[in-house]
Image: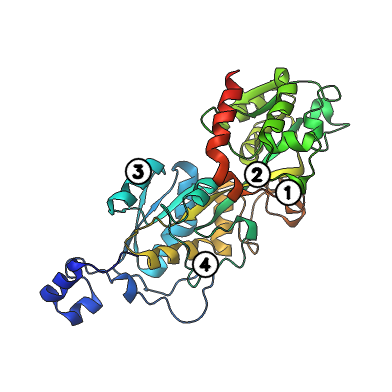
Amino acid sequence: MPEKTGRTIGKVAACGALLLALTACSGGAPAARDIDLGPGPAAAGTVKKGALDGVTLTFASYGGIYQDGQETSAVKPFATESGAKMLSDGPTDYTKLKAQVDSGNVTWDVVDTDAIWAERQCGKLLMPLDTTIVDTSKLPKDMVGKCSVPAMTYGMVLMYDKSKFGANPPKDWADFFDTAKFPGKRAIPGVASDAAPGPLEAALIADGVAPDKLFPLDVDRGLKKLTGVRSSLVFWDTGARSQQLLESGEVSMAMVWTGRAYSAVKNGAKFAPQWNQFMPVSDSLAVPKNAKNPKASMALINYYLGAGQQARLTELTSYSPINSEAEPKIDAAASEYLTSTPERQAKALKLDNAWWAQNQEQIIQKWSDWLAR
């Protein structure tokens, strides 16, 4: 929260101390310290009626169906209940966000970001969560950071061609790397300018590393394992490309995001998921450092995390809810790709976003060099 400055004294002189305590002279919006969110502990999905009358907040995300779903399920209902005026912006741009924070002119109040980026920027470009306002009790504990909470979740999953391997499907990432037993091309993400959980973890597990001993990642060992099957690899650089590879049948197996896997199967791809050792992924919600009204921003995040809001978001976007009590009403096909069920969570790999945040830049260099060979 910005500290008091000489401008505050000027406003007192211009408006009077009593008036300042109630409202800013020029805008009519209550100061952050004057917002009353009600008594008692925070409860996800709730906000005191009219608590933010006169407050304007801007929600920034990635646009498209995803942001439309966020606004329909949470942002607009929050405006109705809290009284806040909600504005939307995007797509999320880290350079733009940094410029806002550095200049002290922050126009985004809540931002949807990559989870690893959020971990890395905690205390730098993002402020710590106020857990007296944000209720995280129904969220996956390993996805909650000091400065961020998950916005939704999905996963990186092994997809296999049922027409080729239906009678004897791959059981894990070791089978993904076994080109003798499971011949054919494999698709994995391959963006030179980015590195994220997925290929390295799978390669190390296939090379015999125990899932609970993955971190710190032995990057060189992982790259060596990937080199061993490089002639069988096809690299995708966008979600759309990964989906296309499944639908065209160009590959026999693929490491893809669950949302794209679901869309491909819905479009007729003869693939099925292997959930064993899938890798959970999430976007994060955070409040930029120097945000004008942190208390109101935290209230929006808390509302967004409600079970009803999360269920509706899943219904609108197919992303999995992060509130354990959310019960989205979706068809059987969509439910096959939810990552949040207890059964699938039990099969998930435990990733270390904090380690990735500390080491991602060095890994990107090695990953880029390996792709360029």
| Contact check, label 3 and label 1, Cβ < 8 Å | no
Is residue 308 something that shows in the picture?
Answer: yes
Q: Which mark is residue 348?
A: 1
Which residue is at a point 80% across and 44% down the rendered structure image?
210
Return the residue at label 3: 96
Return the residue at label 4: 45
Residue 201 drawn at (x, y percent): 70, 38
Q: Which mark is residue 340?
A: none
Residue 133 drawn at (x, y percent): 47, 70
Which of the 4 image quarters holds residue 35?
bottom left
Q: Secondary structure at mark 3?
A: helix
Residue 98 drawn at (x, y percent): 36, 46
Residue 51 drawn at (x, y percent): 37, 73
| Contact check, label 2 and label 1, Cβ < 8 Å | yes
The mark nearer the N terminus, 1 or 4, is 4
Q: Secondary structure at mark 4?
A: loop
Q: CA distance from mark 3 to mark 2?
A: 28 Å
